[in-house]
Each structure stands twice: as C-alpha cells, then as structure tokens.
Amino acid sequence: MRIIAITSPKVIEDDVFLIQRLLEKGIDTIHLRKPDSGIHECRKLLEALTPEQRTKIIIHDYPELYEEFSLKGIHVNKNVPILPSDYKGYRTRSCHSLEEVQRHKNEYDYVFLSPIFDSISKVGHRSGFTKEELLEASATGIIDEKVIALGGVTFDKIADLKALNFGGVAMIGSIYHRNALCKLNHGALI
C-alpha cells in the first residue's frame, strides 16, 4: 500500500525538515501542494532538498518547477487542470466522485479519491461517501490499486482502507500532527 504525504498549503519553516524526515521514514511520495505560497517560496523549498529527495516530489501548483527540479511528477487539480502537451512524467489527479475515478483512473498513475472521512486539515470538509458506497465501489473494482484514499485519513484507519482495496493513503493533517514522526518511527506505516 502506498503511503503519500501532502504538504500544508503554505510554506512553513519546518517544511524541509519534515519532508526529509518523512522520506527517511519510508513515505513513498510527497505531494508539494502550496496554493497559499508563491512560486519563489516553493522554489526555495525545493532548492533545500537533495536531487534524490526531489525525485519523490509531485508538484501541484507550479508545474513549471517539474522540469526545473527533475521532480517525480505533476498533479492535475483545479489549479492545474491539464498537463503540458509534451509532458511524459508521472501523472496524478484529484477526484471527488466515484464517477470521476472511473472516468480518469486509467489515464493516470494514480488518482486521489476524497473526502473519504471528515477532514482533519479543512474545517467543515465532510466525508463524501458512505461505508456502503465504498464497499460497493471496492466490490465492483472502482476502488483498486490506482485509487488513493484522501481526506481524514489517520494511522488507525489504514487497515480498513487496505481492506477496501485502496492502493494507498494520502495524509495531510495526520502527517503534520506532532506525533506523526514518532508513529512512523514505530513502524505504524512501514
């Protein structure tokens, strides 16, 4: 099961340290999602990472940084609605319905499906799916190894999401909680 971290929306002082520690602890991929920060702040953050660390970064808001820093890939969402025409890298996408997953998952390396649970990082952002809907989507193959659960994902929910056949989990709020690195240390994720 893939374990993916998504950064907080604004560049913070601890970002470089946190990204480095998460990668050291076995996080597969980091999505650099910084809609509340400018391209120059994101560039500065990427400059502080090693070339090897950058190969595990998927960029959300500034696709031009993909080539400049030899990043892993580009994420399609409302801020980046299409990939550059000559793009050949890793492709990911946000989806907010099961229909959207069915329509797009074969065009991408993986898609996020959200919100699976009530959000930790976005106040008032409620789950978009019932347990029954997720069970049916799993049984019919809509949820599979190319679908990543996002939204309210915590360490204690990973086993349930694996049982639903999600190919991985993505976390924002849980990762930024002060105990996240400790849990990573004790093998909760890897």
Image (cartoon, rainbow, N blue to C red):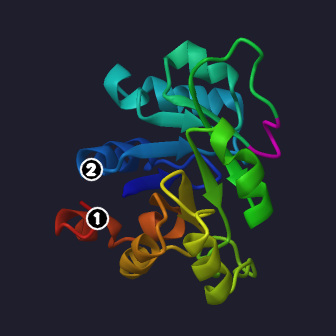
Residue 103 picture location, percent across and down = 77, 50
Dot 1 crowding, Cα within 10 Å, few <14, some 14–19, many 20+: some
Mark linked to residue 116 = none
Residue 129 picture location, percent across and down = 70, 80
Q: Nearer the viewer, residue 71 or 91?
A: 91
Q: Secondary structure at mark 2?
A: loop
Q: Main secondary structure of the magenta part?
A: loop
Residue at image location 76% in from the left, 45% down from the top? 77
Give yes or no for residue 78 being in the magenta stretch. Answer: yes
Residue at image location 58% in from the left, 81% down from the top? 135
Q: Which residue position is annotated with label 1? A: 189
Instruction: Note whether 68 is above or below 5 in the view shown.
Output: above
Dot 2 crowding, Cα within 10 Å, few <14, some 14–19, many 20+: some
Say whether marks 2 and 1 touch (CB < 8 Å). Answer: yes
- The answer to whether residue 117 is visible is no
Q: Nearer the viewer, residue 118 or 35?
A: 118
- The answer to whether residue 14 is visible is yes
Please identify the quarter of the rendering in which residue 31 is found: top right
Residue 14 picture location, percent across and down = 43, 50
Q: Amino acid at mark 2?
A: Gly
162 to the left or right of 6: left
